[in-house]
DNA sequence: CCTGGGGGTAGGG
DNA sequence: CCCTACCCCCAGG
């Protein structure tokens, strides 16, 4: 009523990103207080930051190609990396790379009721091409009664961080394969460079806040692989992102070793090719 | 107090 | 019609 809606500016978003990169997710107050970001976020509350981050974490899932390996039989995700058809590298994929935050860290405990359903639906459907929101919705609707606004809830829930790890991973594996960032030569880092903060030529193990992470080996391997890449090319960005992704995945993994394998796979691919598709 | 999560509403395709 | 962006409220730590 008294708030005509204050759209977030690029500066604000960038500040938020930077803040999260520095302090980690969940330190909204710290970020907001930080004199470095305060000038940009002075008009935003920590709650606003949190909400905005939640929104930014929503990278619309895309489905198109049918090149996917369903691998029905085991829970082990089958490393759905981009298929060899990449021989001719995509012309000039827009960088859009601002999509990185999938943030979790909170995806370890308390699994909301819906997540189980979602996971169940996706598992049951197991469509080669992936299941979109509607499919999942249908599946669930046919099995039990859902509130009228369930679609939205589902829609949000699916792409929201913090969703049950397995569900997220599965979701990512199955239908969000070719989503996030793809890296092209120098085409990237040219426009807006949405990464003002994490531009380390040598990807180290970024802010290891306080997670124990069951993947020391992976991180090492990751660092190594990433290091090679960065050394060989100027793809430090990719490497850094990859490391990040690995940590993320590792953190999500609770008891699934295949996830760690996936992480390794990604890094190996990363060191060889250039096109790395992660969710 | 701060954070995370649910939900409502307005605007755009 | 559906989806996205912002905002508000509530419960837990």
Image: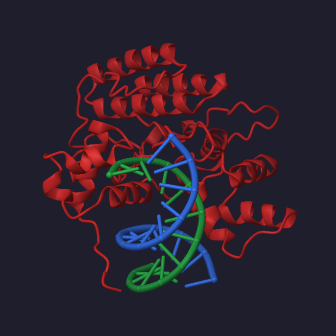
Chain colours: A red, B green, C blue
In this view of the protein, which residue sits in the foreground, A238 or A159?
Answer: A159
Q: Where residue A189 sits: x, y (%)?
A: 24, 44
Q: Where residue A202 sits: x, y (%)?
A: 26, 22
- The answer to which image quadrant residue A133 occupies is bottom right
| Residue at x 62% of width, y 65% of height | A153
| On screen, residue A243 above or below A164 | above
Is A80 left, or right, of A269 in this rendering?
right
| Residue at x 20% of width, y 43% of height | A196
| On screen, residue A18 above or below A250 | below
| Residue at x 76% of width, y 36% of height | A71
| On screen, residue A253 above or below A62 | above
Is A192 left, or right, of B7 in this rendering?
left
Q: Where residue A50 sits: x, y (%)?
A: 38, 55
Q: How many labels does the image show?
A: 0
Residue closest to the far right: A143
- The answer to which image quadrant residue A173 occupies is top right
- The answer to which image quadrant residue A170 occupies is top right
**Which quadrant of the rendered structure holds the N terminus of chain A?**
bottom left
Q: Where residue B6 sits: x, y (%)?
A: 60, 63
| Residue at x 55% of width, y 19% of height | A214
Is A165 left, or right, of A36 in this rendering?
right
């Amino acid at each position: 009523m008294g708030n005509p809606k204050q759209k977030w500016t690029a500066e604000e978003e960038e500040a938020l990103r930077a803040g999260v990169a520095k302090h980690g997710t969940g330190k909204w107050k710290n970020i907001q207080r930080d004199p470095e970001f305060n000038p940009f976020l002075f008009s935003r509350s920590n709650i606003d930051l949190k909400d905005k981050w939640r929104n930014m974490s929503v990278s619309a899932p895309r489905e198109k190609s049918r090149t996917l390996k369903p691998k029905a039989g085991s829970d082990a995700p089958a490393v759905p990396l981009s298929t060899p058809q990449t021989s001719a590298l995509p012309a000039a994929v827009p960088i859009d790379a601002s999509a990185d935050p999938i943030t979790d860290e909170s995806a370890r405990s308390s699994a909301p009721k819906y997540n189980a359903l979602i996971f169940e639906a996706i598992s049951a459907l197991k469509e080669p091409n992936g299941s979109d929101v509607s499919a999942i919705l249908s599946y669930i609707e046919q099995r039990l009664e859902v509130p009228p606004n369930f679609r939205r809830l589902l829609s949000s829930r699916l792409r929201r961080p913090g969703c049950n790890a397995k569900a997220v991973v599965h979701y990512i594996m199955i239908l969000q394969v070719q989503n996030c960032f793809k890296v092209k030569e120098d085409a990237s880092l040219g426009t807006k460079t949405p990464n003002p903060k994490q531009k380390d030529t040598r990807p180290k193990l970024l802010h290891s806040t306080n997670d124990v992470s069951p993947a020391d080996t992976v991180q090492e391997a990751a660092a190594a692989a990433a290091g090679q890449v960065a050394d060989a090319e100027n793809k430090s960005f990719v490497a850094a992102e990859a490391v990040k992704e690995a940590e993320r995945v590792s953190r999500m993994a609770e008891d699934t070793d295949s996830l760690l394998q996936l992480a390794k796979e990604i890094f190996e691919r990363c060191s060889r090719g250039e096109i790395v598709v992660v969710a």
